[in-house]
Amino acid sequence: MSETQRIVKIELDERGLVRRSPQIEHERKVAIYDLIEENSFAIAGFEGPYQLRLGVEENRLAFDVRDVQGAELLRFAMPLAPFKMIVKDYFTLCESYLAAIKTATPSRIEAIDMGRRGLHNEGAELLRERLADKVAVDSGTARRLFTLLCVLHIKA
């Protein structure tokens, strides 16, 4: 992992977001912590490390990338529409998983969890592809960013 091609600080623009369940809040905190600990985030023509602010603006995922002093380096947004079904299905499987851990057999829980992880990987790969013309990220970074995209997707 390069010391310059990485995110050192991340914030979510949480204006308009609803209060989240303890499980979602935990996932958000873990994703941010893990992202800061290990990530690869490279922008052609710029050297990091970077600060990143993610938010949703007009049904688009907004990226505001700054240097460590806070100077703006790159600002862009991508449509959320391509993620809509993956996020919806992912949330459905997450709900099924939480229900299953209370009463289902271990094999059923494992099957649901495998599906959940598969959808998460699919969403992360789509995010990675959509970012490719602006930012190069590794799989782990894409997975954590997809988790944060899901958190930002939660509406009232």
Image (cartoon, rainbow, N blue to C red):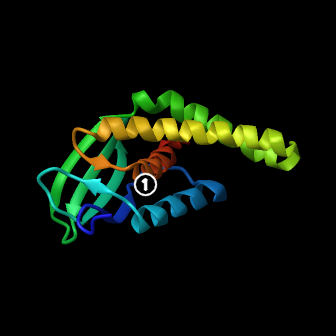
| Total labels drawn | 1
> Is any atom of residue 139 visible in this view?
yes
Is residue 139 rendered to the left or right of residue 133?
A: right
Q: Position of residue 141 (x, y in %)?
A: 40, 53
Query: Residue 137: x and y, percent?
Result: 33, 49
Quadrant of the snapshot with the C terminus = top right
Q: Is residue 89 above or below residue 2?
A: above
Where the N terminus falls, by quadrant?
bottom left
Residue 96 visible in the shown view: no
| Of residues 104 and 11, the one drawn nearer to the viewer in this rendering | 104
Could you say which is closer to the camera, residue 12 or residue 98?
Answer: 98
Q: Residue 152 at x, y = what percent?
A: 46, 47
Q: Label 1: few (<14), some or many (≥20) within 10 Å?
A: few
| Residue type marked 1 | Glu
Q: Residue at x 60, y 61 (%)?
A: 26
Name the residue nearer the viewer: 113 or 25.
Answer: 113
- Residue positioned most to the front: 1
User: In this view, which residue lies farthest toward the bottom?
Assistant: 69
Left/right of residue 80 with respect to residue 106 in the rendered view: left
Residue at (81, 38) in percent of width and height: 108
The residue carrying mark 1 is 14
